[in-house]
């Protein structure tokens, strides 16, 4: 199967209101161009150096989404070419994004990464921790780092019921945040959930953005 035909097949399963992030990490520019030529414009990357090199070589109308763990010292570098950061997991990181985005006068969409899986290794805020941050910190004064929604990764398992429960939990947490904090903020609207193996379930549970790599580009070679 070619990248173009994989994309066609995946698109046929995604409703219009759900954005497809083509996760191109560890895949070469040629693969990204193939997807680009098949009409794909949003790509997800997880490492600063890698996306830095790629965006230099690739068409400038690509919308880059950063989906990996982001260290504060990498923020400045990625902002000029980044549209959305899916992996915002601390107030320190939001402040750093705000500071650097202000310097270049650019608004950056930030998604709060929420820990919904069983696995220890998955990063992100716990529900409580996230609400505590929103209670304590003056996020209303942010001008450039725009909190646009939430992101989460389900446990990696074949247990569909479990995955569905985790996505449900993220969806209802989003609804709570919307109600309690972001009612008057139209831009708080995104639920980034669903990867190659579980995006169909995620869409059924209310995802607005799916992050799909393997099903488009094939297995990654690390
Ligand atoms: C790598 C990655 C994906 C894509 O995973 P696939 O299983 O290849 O679709 C999605 N989200 C995040 C956060 C990732 O790191």
Image: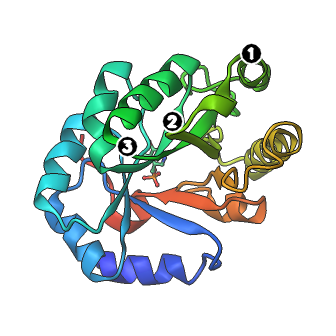
Secondary structure beneath dot 2 equals: strand
For the residues bearing labels 3 and 1, Cβ distance under 8 angstroms: no
Q: Is residue 127 above or below residue 37?
A: above
Q: Nearer the viewer, residue 93 or 22?
A: 93
Q: Position of residue 2 (x, y in %)?
A: 29, 79
Task: Name the residue carrying label 3.
Answer: 105
Which quarter of the image is occupied by the N terminus? bottom left
Determine whether the residue tagged by mark 1 lies in a helix, strand or loop.
helix
Query: From what the image shows, is residue 198 above or below residue 144?
Result: below
Query: Real-space Cα distance between discs 2 and 1?
Result: 20 Å
The residue pinned by badge 2 equals: 87
Does residue 46 appear anywhere in the picture?
yes
**Ligand 1 within 8 A of label 2's CB?**
yes
Q: Is mark 1 within 8 Å of ligand 1?
A: no
Is residue 196 something one can see in this rendering?
Answer: no
Pair 3/2: label in front: 3
Mark 2 or mark 1: name the one nearer the start of the chain.
Answer: 2
164 left or right of 66 in image: right
**Badge nearest the viewer, 3 or 1:** 3
Residue that appears at 56% across and 26% down: 89
Q: Earlier in the sequence, mark 3 or mark 1?
A: 3
Dot 2 crowding, Cα within 10 Å, few <14, some 14–19, many 20+: many
Which labelled disc corresponds to residue 4?
A: none
Q: Which residue is mark 1?
A: 136
Point 74% across, 52% down: residue: 160
Classify mark 3: residues with Cα within 10 Å, few (<14), some (14-19) or many (20+).
few
Residue 190: image location, x then y, percent? 65, 54
| Residue shown at the point (38%, 21%) measured from the top left | 72
Q: Nearer the viewer, residue 138 or 121?
A: 138
Which quarter of the image is occupied by the C terminus? top left
Picture coordinates of residue 205, whole percent (x, y): 78, 58
Q: Nearer the viewer, mark 2 or mark 1?
A: 1
């Amino acid at each position: 199967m070619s990248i173009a035909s994989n994309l066609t097949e995946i698109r046929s399963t995604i409703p219009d209101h759900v954005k497809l992030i083509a996760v191109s990490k560890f895949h070469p520019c040629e693969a990204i161009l193939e997807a680009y030529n098949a009409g794909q414009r949003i790509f997800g990357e997880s490492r600063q150096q890698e996306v830095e090199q790629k965006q230099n070589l690739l068409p400038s109308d690509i919308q880059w989404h950063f989906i990996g763990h982001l260290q504060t010292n990498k923020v400045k570098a990625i902002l000029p070419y980044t549209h959305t950061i899916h992996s915002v997991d601390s107030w320190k990181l939001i402040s750093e994004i705000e500071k650097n985005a202000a310097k270049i006068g650019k608004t950056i969409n930030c998604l709060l990464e929420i820990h919904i899986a069983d696995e220890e290794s998955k990063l992100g805020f716990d529900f409580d921790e996230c609400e505590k941050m929103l209670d304590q910190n003056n996020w209303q004064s942010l001008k450039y780092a725009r909190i646009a929604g939430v992101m989460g990764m389900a446990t990696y398992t074949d247990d569909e019921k479990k995955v569905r429960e985790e996505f449900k939990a993220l969806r209802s947490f989003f609804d709570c945040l919307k109600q309690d904090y972001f009612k008057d903020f139209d831009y708080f609207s995104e639920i980034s959930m669903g990867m190659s193996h579980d995006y169909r379930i995620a869409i059924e549970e209310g995802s607005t953005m799916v992050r799909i790599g393997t099903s488009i580009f094939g297995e990654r070679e690390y």
